[in-house]
Amino acid sequence: MTDSTNKELTTTRIAFERANAGGEMLFEVRPGVPILDVLTSASCYLASAIETVYQSAEVNNGSDSLYGAALLVRMSKAVVDAAIKALDDIQEGATA
């Protein structure tokens, strides 16, 4: 993959979060946003979610289900971070 190809990787529109029983969607990921930027944002959101779940587990006397949820979020963050690293490696290889 060349640097110019990597720069062309962008998001597509994905709507999420139903607003009503009719199925209208409230939010969406906008098309055309660079993938690396989106993944970096997602990693930050997941880091925040991890901290929130751990804090909730502490307040709820170490709830096993909350620690399980934290693990699921940490796994998701690891996948996103691995994708970011792969894109960074591709960009560095294209500019070397």
Image: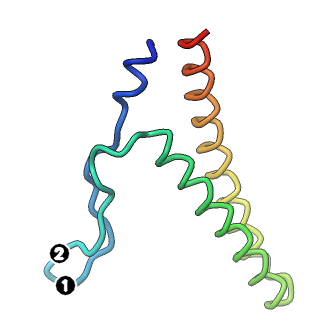
> Is 34 or 68 nearer to us in this picture?
34
Q: Residues within 10 Å of mark 2 (few under 14, many from 20)?
A: few
Q: Quadrant of residue 20?
A: bottom left
- Asked if residue 22 is positioned above or below residue 71 in the image, the reply reads below
Placement of 90 over or under 78, stated as above or below:
above
What residue is shown at x 61% (from left), y 19% (from top)? 92
Extreme front residue here?
Answer: 95
Residue drawn at x 61%, y 52% is 76
In this orientation, which residue lies closer to the viewer: 12 or 62? Answer: 12
**Disc on res. 21:** 1
Task: Place residue 59 in its image quadrant.
Answer: bottom right
Counting from the top left corner in percent of width and height, residue 41 is at: 54, 54
Q: Calculate the distance from the C-alpha at mark 1 to the C-alpha at mark 2.
A: 8 Å
**What element does badge 2 sit on?**
loop
Residue 33 lies, in percent from the top left, at 35, 45
In this view, the residue farthest toward the top is 96
Q: Which residue type does callout 1 highlight?
A: Ala
Residue 91, horizontal then vertical, whole percent: 55, 21
Q: Amino acid at mark 2?
A: Glu
Judging from the image, the colouring scheme is rainbow
Which residue lies at the image location 70% right of the left edge and 56% below the top edge? 74
Question: Looking at the image, which residue is at 59% across and 37% down?
Answer: 84
On the image, the x and y values in percent for residue 93 come to: 60, 13
Position of the C terminus by quadrant: top right
Screen quadrant of the N terminus: top left
Which residue is more in the foreground, 69 or 28?
Answer: 28
Q: Mark 2 sits on what residue?
A: 24
Q: Secondary structure at mark 1?
A: loop
Crowding at dot 1, Cα within 10 Å, few <14 / some 14-19 / many 20+, comes out as few
